[in-house]
Amino acid sequence: MKQKALPWGPPALPRMWRTLTCTLTAGGSAASSRLSMEGPASPAPAPGALPYYVAFSQLLGLTVVAMTGAWLGMYRGGIAWESALQFNVHPLCMVIGLVFLQGDALLVYRVFRNEAKRTTKVLHGLLHVFAFVIALVGLVAVFEHHRKKGYADLYSLHSWCGILVFALFFAQWLVGFSFFLFPGASFSLRSRYRPQHVFFGAAIFLLSVATALLGLKEALLFELGTKYSTFEPEGVLANVLGLLLAAFATVVLYILTRADWKRPLQAEEQALSMDFKTLTEGDSPSSQ
């Protein structure tokens, strides 16, 4: 009895490859024709209120950094690496790295709306690198300070949350680099992972702010003790700093969650998206 040849056997492979190539070529040509008929895409204007919210977030962020420095300078003796003031490097670096710079990195796709996607990705990744390096300096500072003073490590809720946030931040950056900057990841894989990347980016940012608030409260209780309840000037200043941290996180999160403020697709991104839809669903881009 003669066995029927399977449609996916070796003789059929060249034919399948030709079909796939023709589909891609046709899809790309149709997408290009459609885009050329519509003309070059003009830069999408920024929504009216977006620049004001972004400017407000930067004002809050810079105020937080300046007030952290003022708190450490006025009430904690300043900052130095080779002295008892080494601990003060920790809160300043964490606020600059894991709060201010991380928040700005999340806003890159809202601020640079009409630049090339590759350029925006690189800037987004570089800001995270700067945030990581600065936070690493702050982490080393606190461990070095504890070692010199003979203090215990990693016993408080603040320290546990801090290590968790730092590990999640590093893992998020590694996975994001592998998927979106490293050329090996496929378009379909990036599309499936993108929602998780966006969610965990915002979640890690909020956890960073919450951990900073825990650390601020812990530092006040250690230094002021029962005097904290008597409205000491340092306590009042630190409370205002905590409110500003929460305000910065709120404004950044609001900007990120406004669907109409998302970065619009550029012409080359639309063509790539239509080509991918043609290959995966068998639809013609011109029929959409």
Image (spheres, grey):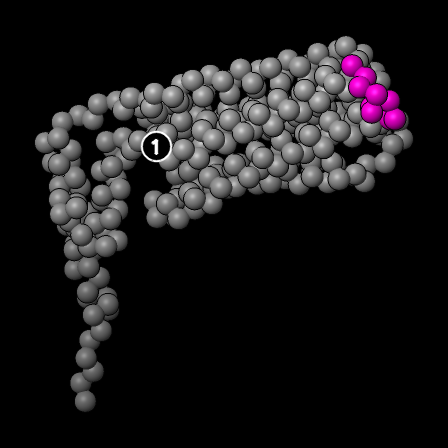
- Residue 123 in picture, x, y percent from top left: 45, 24
In this picture, residue 51 sits left or right of residue 145:
left
Q: Does residue 66 appear in this view?
A: yes
Residue at position x 62%, y 33% in the image: 208
Question: Can you tell which quarter of the image residue 79 is in?
Answer: top right
**In front of the other: 14 or 154:** 154
Side of 182 relative to 165 (left or right):
left
Q: Residue furthest bottom?
A: 1
Reply yes or no: does residue 148 show up in magenta: no
In the image, residue 27 lies at what x, y percent? 16, 45
The boundaries of the magenta stretch are 223-233
* Crowd tier of the residue under label 1, counting other residues whose Cα lies within 10 Å: few below 14, some 14–19, many 20 or above: few
Spot the residue most to the right.
150
Of the 4 image quadrants, the one containing the N terminus is bottom left
Q: Main secondary structure of the magenta part?
A: helix
Count of numbered marks: 1
Picture layout, residue 264 above or below residue 8: above
Residue 109 vs 71, above or below: the answer is: below
Q: Position of residue 218 (x, y in %)?
A: 78, 30
Picture coordinates of residue 111 (x, y %)? 40, 22
Q: Nearer the viewer, residue 207 or 272?
A: 207
Residue at the image point whose x is 44% and y is 25% from the top: 108
Establish if 157 lies above or below 49: below
Q: Is residue 81 visible?
A: no
Identify the residue at horizontal 38%, vertical 21% (top origin).
49
Residue holding disc 1:
260
